[in-house]
Amino acid sequence: MKLIFPIMLSAAALAMPAAAEPVTYDIDPSHTYPSFEADHLGGLSTWRGKFNKTSGVIVLDRAARTGTIDITVQIDSVDFGHDEMNRHAVAPDIFDAARYPTATFKGRFTEFDGDRPETAVGEFTLRGVTRTLELDIDDFKCMHHPLEKREACGADVSASFNRGDYGLDFGLDMGFKPEVELEIQVEALRRP
C-alpha cells in the first residue's frame, strides 16, 4: 500500500492538465509601426503617417485566454514622408512633442477566438489626455522566428478615435474632419 499510493498520486498529477502560464514578449521596434490616416481640408485628401519608434511589452497566456499590453510610442518619430509636415506635426499646435513626448496604450485582451486574441481594451493617452480605446486584432500568429531563434508573435491591429477628444484640434476650425484611423503592424519576441 505504501508503494501504490505515491504511484497513484504521480499518475493523477500526470493526468491533470498543465497550468496555463503567461509568456512575456518584447515589442520588436524594427517590425512595429503604428500608422494613421486623417483628413486634410475636409475631404481634399487623406494624409497618412507613421511613428518610427515604438517600445513595450505584451504578456499573453493563450491557454487561459488572458493578457496585457503596455506600449509606448515616441511622438517625435512621426513620419509623413514629408519633411515640412514632420516638423510641423511635433510643434505645439499639433502633437506638442516637447510637452507630450509619448503616446501610450495600457490595456488587456478582452476577446479571443480559441487561443488567439481578437480584441483589447485599454487606456490610450495622447497629448496628456487619457481615454478608453478598443483595438481590433486581425491576423494574429505566433511562430518560431528563423532568424531570432525564438518564438515571435505578430498581428495587424486597428482602431479609430476622434482626435479632438485628445486636444489634437489643429485644423478642425477649418473643416478638417476629426476622425483618425489607426493601422498598426506589430511583432513581438518572446523574452528569453
Image (spheres, helix red, strand yellow):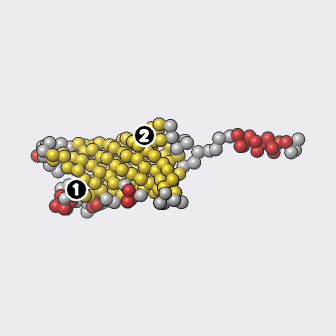
Residue occupied by mark 1: 80
Residue at 36% in and 45% down: 157
Left-right relation of 74 to 171:
right
Q: Secondary structure at mark 2?
A: strand
Q: Amino acid at mark 1?
A: Phe
Mark 2 crowdedness (10 Å alpha carbons): few <14, some 14-19, many ≥20: some
Left-right relation of 51 to 174:
right
75 in relation to 107, above or below = below
Left-right relation of 4 to 192:
right
100 in relation to 44, above or below = below
Q: Amino acid at mark 2?
A: Glu
Q: Earlier in the sequence, mark 1 or mark 2?
A: 1
Count of number-bearing discs = 2
The percent coordinates of residue 16 (x first, y second) are 68, 40
The percent coordinates of residue 37 (x first, y second) are 24, 47
Left-right relation of 79 to 185:
left
The quadrant where residue 42 appears: top left
Residue at 48% in and 46% down: 67
The percent coordinates of residue 117 (x first, y second) are 45, 42
Residue occupied by mark 2: 118
Q: State the quadrant of the N terminus.
A: top right
Mark 1 crowdedness (10 Å alpha carbons): few <14, some 14-19, many ≥20: some
Could you say which is closer to the camera, residue 142 or residue 44?
Answer: 142
Q: Secondary structure at mark 1?
A: loop
Report the residue that reaches farthest toward the left.
Answer: 174
Q: CA distance from mark 1 to mark 2?
A: 29 Å
Q: Is residue 97 visible?
A: yes
Q: Is residue 173 visible?
A: no
Q: State the quadrant of the C terminus.
A: bottom right
Q: In the rendering, which numbered label is found on residue 170? A: none
The percent coordinates of residue 132 (x first, y second) are 35, 43
Residue at 34% in and 60% down: 53
